[in-house]
Image (tube, rainbow, N blue to C red):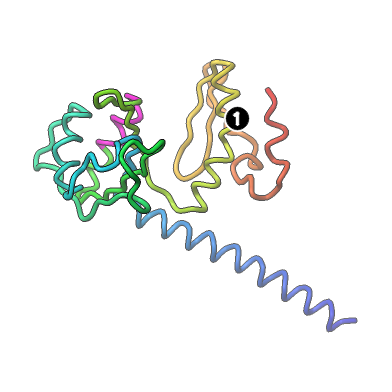
Amino acid sequence: MGTLETHVATKQDRDQDLLYLQSKITDLEDRSRRDNIRLFGIPENEEGPDVQAFLGSVLPKLTSLTFDPPLEFQRAHRVGPKRPDGASRPHPIIACLLRHTQTRQLLQVARNHRPFRIDKYEIRITDEYSKDTNERRKAFLALRTRLGQLEMKYGLFDPARMSVTKNGGQHEPNPQLTYPQQSKDAGTPLIL
């Protein structure tokens, strides 16, 4: 019986180690993407053959920011295969800026002024996160919707934490809400 208990304890230790390592990998992936932005709503083929040149000319106009030195990109591309013109939802564009300060400026303006408009299109600019972090952030969608209906102020912070302002003071939600993957029913107590 002692051997079985040892194996169970060893497996539990390995599972904890695995979860720890997965969280470290997610953290490293998120940090490697910190200079990336995602742009939603730009029509397919609008950017032409040079996405970087297109973004370098459009982003300053869109955000009313002046950049000195001008915006420079390490890379920029659409996600996924090309869609025909007029497709229902265009693929997002991911761009990695050369300067972290410019990335933060763009994201700060994007948070305060949503959405931007080009002609009849609504453009959104967001951070880019790993798949795991995106899933954790999506878990707050129902709560965000409900808080919006109640006209309560809230903030969703990096990487996936929420703060709610109630009666002029900030309150952190229950840790269960910070990591909803712990329980499939973590969303049920969100009824306000």
Horizontal side of 37 relative to 12 (left or right) equals: left
Q: Position of residue 77 (x, y in %)?
A: 27, 51
* Residue furthest out toward the left: 69
Q: Position of residue 94 (x, y in %)?
A: 31, 48
* Residue furthest out toward the bottom: 3
Horizontal side of 8 relative to 102 (left or right) equals: right
Q: Quadrant of residue 150?
A: top right
Whether residue 113 appears in magenta in the rendering, the answer is: yes
**Residue at point 44%, 43% (across, down):** 158
Q: Position of residue 177 (x, y in %)?
A: 63, 39
Instruction: Report the magenta stretch's main SS.
Output: helix
For label 1, the SS is helix
Please name the amino acid that badge 1 sits on. Leu
In the picture, the quarter occupied by the N terminus is: bottom right
Location of residue 133 with respect to 144 vertically, above or below: below
Q: Quadrant of residue 30?
A: bottom left
Residue in the foreground of this view, choosing between 192 and 51: 51
Q: Which residue is mark 1?
A: 143
Q: Position of residue 139 (x, y in %)?
A: 59, 40
Task: Assess disc 1: are there few (<14), some (14-19) or many (≥20) residues with their C-alpha within 10 Å of its C-alpha.
Answer: many
In the picture, the quarter occupied by the C terminus is: top right
Total numbered circles: 1
Residue in the foreground of this view, choosing between 174 and 187: 187
**Residue at point 21%, 42% (across, down):** 47
Location of residue 31 with respect to 192 vertically, above or below: below
**Residue at point 54%, 15% (across, down):** 151
Q: From which residue to which does the magenta span run?
A: 105-114
Location of residue 50 with respect to 6 vertically, above or below: above
Whether residue 66 appears in magenta in the rendering, the answer is: no
